[in-house]
Image (cartoon, coloured by chain):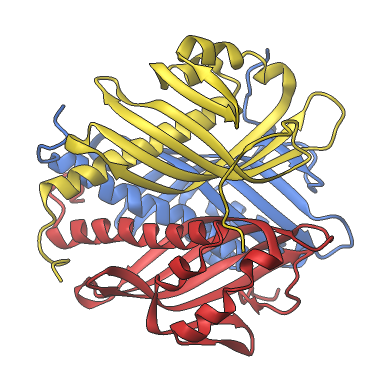
Chain colours: A yellow, B blue, C red
Amino acid sequence: MTTTQKPTDTVLAELVQTERIHRLLFDYAFHLDMNHPDEIAALFTEDCYVAYGPTFGAEGRQAYSETLGGIGSFFAATSHHVSNIVVDFGPDLATAIVRSVLYAWHKYTKERPDGHFFGQYHDELVRTDEGWRFKRRELRASGVVDFHVKKQIPIGRAES
Amino acid sequence: MTTTQKPTDTVLAELVQTERIHRLLFDYAFHLDMNHPDEIAALFTEDCYVAYGPTFGAEGRQAYSETLGGIGSFFAATSHHVSNIVVDFGPDLATAIVRSVLYAWHKYTKERPDGHFFGQYHDELVRTDEGWRFKRRELRASGVVDFHVKKQIPIGRAES
Amino acid sequence: MTTTQKPTDTVLAELVQTERIHRLLFDYAFHLDMNHPDEIAALFTEDCYVAYGPTFGAEGRQAYSETLGGIGSFFAATSHHVSNIVVDFGPDLATAIVRSVLYAWHKYTKERPDGHFFGQYHDELVRTDEGWRFKRRELRASGVVDFHVKKQIPIGRAES
């Protein structure tokens, strides 16, 4: 047991970067709920890949950015609740693999029941001079209720 | 890249205080769900301001405290889920601006559908000898479902 | 006010262990949603106690493990959202008392409405050579909606 010993500088540096990674995830959710597509896109790398579904996604920030235009007109309101964040760092804390859990509520502009999304984000982050950015973001569904997207990437729950 | 260098004492002090600020937010939610109005009020400064709606709020801990009396009789149960916490410190870590996200479920004592609140807390905190306290707390709504309060402070989602 | 002073090694060690404890709670939720009963059981001590209801629970990892077999067949999907985590350490950071909040969504294999659970985890953790483990885990309910378990341990909300 070494808990009462001084934590190493590396462990402390990981803690500091973990908090900054939390903020990246929270800024994404904030700007999504605020309908700030430009601020969302700025959180991704130029060569990012964003996986939407089993068979498709957006390659590159420009392509991803174009998919964000409809947020404001398609949704009347959204609320993204991100928790259960687990961070694993690469060498020199230059990259990170991050897993988190999402509950998202969606109110549509069209007359239809509110949509509920339950699932996981799986992210590959890179540390840039401007801070942490999404290089790859994949959203997987545990399940949905009255959601507008019919086909999701499953979390891969084991069969019994 | 300085991640593998030793974090500065200031950065580490911010991490320590960030965890304590998380606890303030979580204690508020805990005492609210437990119907502990006195414990809730004790988390606020004497001169606090709590914003309820677009046009009204409670000025001072005493006035705020009086608004908490009805929690137990009005709600049969509540559950406040706080996440997406982002903290920005003022000089000397004596103050902090905090943004967080709330999903709150409400079961009423009256026969009516459960109420759901989705939104953001925007807090101004001050550090006292007894620890962090709320000087200003504002609750903004992304949206609500079957909620008893008809008029909320909007999060200010951008129009498209 | 000593915030700008260097945090003590003990305080920093607590921060490091707090993050590891978060991960234990998140790994539990992850493996539950992924239907990984063996991975869940491995997070508990040999002599653990898991409290299910007001009058019963599982004593020991083996007994607990046997209760996990039905997860995959009983639920079509679940999503466990853990937040509001508050950690209090024992001497030498060898033990910890942890309180957290849960929102869990359950989709059943049987034809019935989705079940929603709102409540609190109350955990007693011990630090082993393999890391933090659950020695005691108790789930208390603020309330439920269409949940399959009729009787829960209440959070003990004060009467008005």
Closest to the observer, C139 or A88: A88
Residue B1 percent location from the top left of the image:
16, 26
Residue C10 image point, x, y percent = 16, 63
Residue at screen point 41% across, 51% down: B22
Task: Using residue A148 as the reference point, say whether residue C91 is left or right of it.
Answer: left
For the residue pair A144 and A38, the one nearer the viewer reads as A144
Q: Is residue B66 left or right of residue A92?
A: right
Q: Nearer the viewer, residue B6 or C77?
A: C77
Q: Where is A124 relative to C13, above or below? A: above
Q: Position of residue A68 (x, y in %)?
A: 59, 17
Residue at screen point 13% across, 48% down: C5
Q: Is residue B87 visible?
A: no
Q: Residue C33 sits in which quadrant? A: bottom right
At x 47%, y 68%, the residue is C40
| Residue C140, position as x, y percentages in the image | 60, 73
Taking the image as shown, residue B10 lies to the left or right of residue B134, namely left
Residue A48, by quadrant, is top left
